[in-house]
Amino acid sequence: MSGWIAGVGRFAFFTIDFLRAVPSSHRPLSRAVVEAYNIGIKSLPILLVIAGFVGTNLSLQGHSAFEPLGGQQMVGMFVALAGMRELAPIIAASMVAAKAGTEMASAIAVMRIREQIDALEVMAVEPRGHLVTPRFLGILLAMPALTAVSIATMVGAGYLVATLQLGLNGSTFMEHALAASEPGDVFWSLFKALLFGVVICLVSCYQGFHSAPGPEGVGRATNRACVVSAVTCVLLNYLLSELYYG
Amino acid sequence: MQHLAAIGRFAIWSGQVGARVFVGPWFLRPAARHCWTVVIRCLLPVTAVVFPFGMVMALQGLSIFELFGAHRMLASLISVAVLRELSPVLASVLVAAQGGSSFAAELGSMRIKEELDATEVMAVDGLAYHVVPRVLALTLACPILNLAGSVAGLTGGFVTAVLFKGEQAGVFLAELWAFTSPVDLWGGVLKTTIFGAIIGLVACYQGWTTTGGAAGVGRAVNDTVVWATIVFITANYFLTSALFGAVG
């Protein structure tokens, strides 16, 4: 237990050090664009696959949930609401944590065990600012875009299952989906995604910086980055939903 | 083309592992030990993720059912969604992220340090000794964690609906099983058994074929989570369609 609390404290100090080092970072914007491209493009294929299959499942589940009520046409509303408000941001977050977050952690952990981070410090470059800032800005750019893409994919996949597999009327589906979607919901879920991006980036980079030596250390840091950021995002998601919809 | 070749290599390797499950030699004690480690390591992440998801389900479900004045339906929606989909999928994602990737890291660093080659030199069958117990452990651990996740998710729904939103506890508990049949529970267990086997095979394959030093171990861990998730989410769609028969 005290180990956990000490870890939270170290994480807080890491975050403060990082925020202090942001202004001294060298050309962060141009590198941030590269990072955003890396994060976005690398996570996009898996995100499309996962969001697509989550959308199909939403349709199947919505159908079986609303069938007893005789409200099969509500499937469109269910897919749009559940996908847009909750699942799209959290799915985007968990996939970015699994793909980009673990890559950040393992890249930084490898630099740590090869003493490249110490080399940066020797050259009077603040390593947190230099390594974390572009990743941080990049993930801020990438997360809302990925979330928007996954909302579209989910609703599209849900539509295909509803019309082709469940034999529902396509225009009724879209009508209900559009009636349920409000701009405020979309912006809130993009905002949630932004916060998830902050969590993923800081947690993954922290794990990388505090990696234990050797290949096991890198493996463990990578592993922890994914699990800790996913759990934190889900907990944060409940608080944010309670705040807005509660 | 490269992808096809990779799939083929994975299939051949999985076939070799699968043959050893039936032919032996069996190492049951390591399998039990690995299973115990996975359950212990994943228990907290699984419950910590499924519990808030149940809470969010209750929150959003209430806002939907308020439109119809059908608050009673909330509990049955939560129980069906948690038992069929949420708990199996989320538990498996967490098992892949925590258990699977730690197996990939272990096997990967054993590969880098040539410990796996040392096993071969000692005439011990590496696949049977290192891989089969881990795959079996994940196959067994995944359904166990799914049950824990189901309980956590239903509790999360109960906490939000009854304690925070003031629904009646009796109505919630009575409606919980109204649309739920044992098929939902066993369907979830069956699904997670298959997911566990998929995660085990993908994770151990990534670890087994690690190359390129410490960075390679990191890459193996990363690929494990990504590929295992893609494969079992794809499988999930077909299993849901088949088990719960949602064809219109």
Image (tube, rainbow, N blue to C red):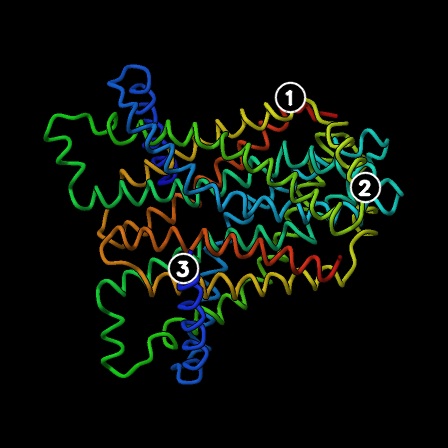
User: Where in the figure is residue B108, as x and y percent of width and height?
Assistant: 26, 44
Q: Does the rendering let one see residue B97?
A: yes
What residue does disc 3 label? A2
What residue does disc 2 label? B168
**Mark 2 and mark 3: Cα distance apart in space:** 39 Å
Q: Earlier in the sequence, mark 1 or mark 2?
A: 2
Q: Chain of mark 1?
A: B
Q: Please rate how many residues cluster around mark 1, counting C-alpha atoms within 10 Å: few if below 14, some from 14 to 19, many from 20.
A: some
Residue that extends furthest to the front in the rendered view of this protein: A2
Q: Amino acid at mark 1?
A: Val
Q: Please rate how many residues cluster around mark 2, counting C-alpha atoms within 10 Å: few if below 14, some from 14 to 19, many from 20.
A: some
Q: Secondary structure at mark 2?
A: loop
User: Where in the figure is residue B208, as x and y percent of width and height?
Assistant: 27, 38
What residue does disc 1 label? B183
Q: Amino acid at mark 2?
A: Gln
Q: Chain of mark 2?
A: B
Please tell me whether mark 3 or mark 1 is closer to you in this view.
3
Q: Chain of mark 3?
A: A
**Mark 1 and mark 2: Cα distance apart in space:** 27 Å
Q: Are marks 2 and 3 in contact (CB under 8 Å)?
A: no
Look at 65% across and 59% down and name the residue there.
A239
Do marks 2 and 3 share a chain? no
Count of residue discs: 3
